[in-house]
Amino acid sequence: MERSVRESIAGGCRIGIMGGTFNPIHYGHLVAAETARVEFALDKVLFIPTGIPPHKVHHQIANSDLRFAMVEMSIRDNENFIASRIEIDREGPSYTYDTLKALHLLFPEQELFFITGSDALRDILSWREAEGIIGISKIIGASRPGYEIGGFLGELFDRYPYAQNRIFEMEIPALAISSTDIRKRIWNNKSIRYLLPEEVRRFIIENNIYISK
C-alpha cells in the first residue's frame, strides 16, 4: 500500500473501507461514506477503486487510473477520506476478501468496517470467502429510507450466528443516483450536472470518458 496511506492511519483507529468500481464516483458514494464516518465514529474512510472487477463487463469500465483520479478529486476537501490504489496495483481480479485480508495484515491494531450498499449486501452469501469477510471486518449496509433488509439479515444471522454483532444497517438520504445512470446520461447527451462533483464532471468531459458504450 502507498506510503502516504500508511502514514495517515494511526494505531487503534477505526477504518471505513468504501470499495467499488467508482465508474464514476458520485454524490451517493460520498454521502454513504460520510454518514458511516459519523454514525460509526470512523477515524478514516479508505476509498478503494476496484482494479479488475470479477463480475462486471470490462469494456464498460473506464481506465483504472482515470477512475482513481476522479476519486481523488472528489474527496480532497475531506481530511478524513483517503484514496488507495491497493486493488488497482494488485494483479488479477479484485476480490473483497483479498483486500480486507491485506488491510488486516497492514493494520492489525485497527478495526475495519466495510461499507457497501444494502442491495450488494444481499449477495454477500455468494461472495468469495464470505465467512472470512465477516470475520475480518464489520459490515455496514447502506440503505435508502423505507428499504428494509431485516428479513435478509435474519437469514444471514441464522447461517452465521456470530455475524449478529458484525453486520449493521445504516439509513442514508434517498439519492436516486447511480454510476450506471450517469453513464447512460452521457451516452444520450443528457446533463449530469449536480449528480457528482463539478470537478469530476469537467474531468469526464475533457477526457471524453464514457462517450461510447
Image (cartoon, rainbow, N blue to C red):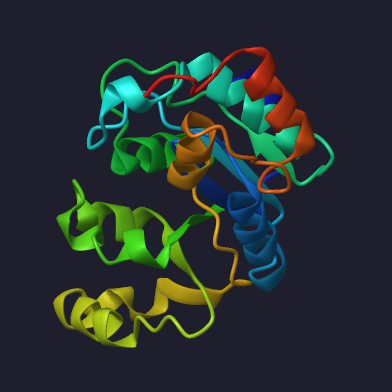
Tag count:
0
Any part of residue 1 in sight: no
Q: In the visual, does 119 lie left or right of 117? A: left
Q: Where is residue 89 in the image (x, y as percent from the top left)?
A: 44, 16
The relative height of residue 126 versus residue 118 in the rendered view (above or below) is above
- Residue 51's quadrant in the figure? top left
Q: Which of 192 and 4 is in front in this view?
A: 192
Between 32 and 81, the residue placed more toward the observer is 32
Report the residue at 77% width, 36% height from top. 198
Residue under the image location 46 percent in, 16 percent down = 63
* Residue drawn at 60 percent across, 71 percent down: 172
Q: Which quarter of the figure has residue 24?
A: top right
Q: In which quarter of the image is the N terminus?
A: top right
177 with respect to 195 (left or right) = left
- Residue 2 or 117: which is nearer the viewer? 117
Residue sitting at 21 percent across and 51 percent down? 127
Question: Compared with residue 35, is residue 91 higher up or lower down, i.e. above or below?
Answer: above
**Quadrant of the drawing holding the C terminus:** top left
Residue 80 to residue 75: above or below: below
Q: Whole-percent x and y of residue 107? A: 54, 40
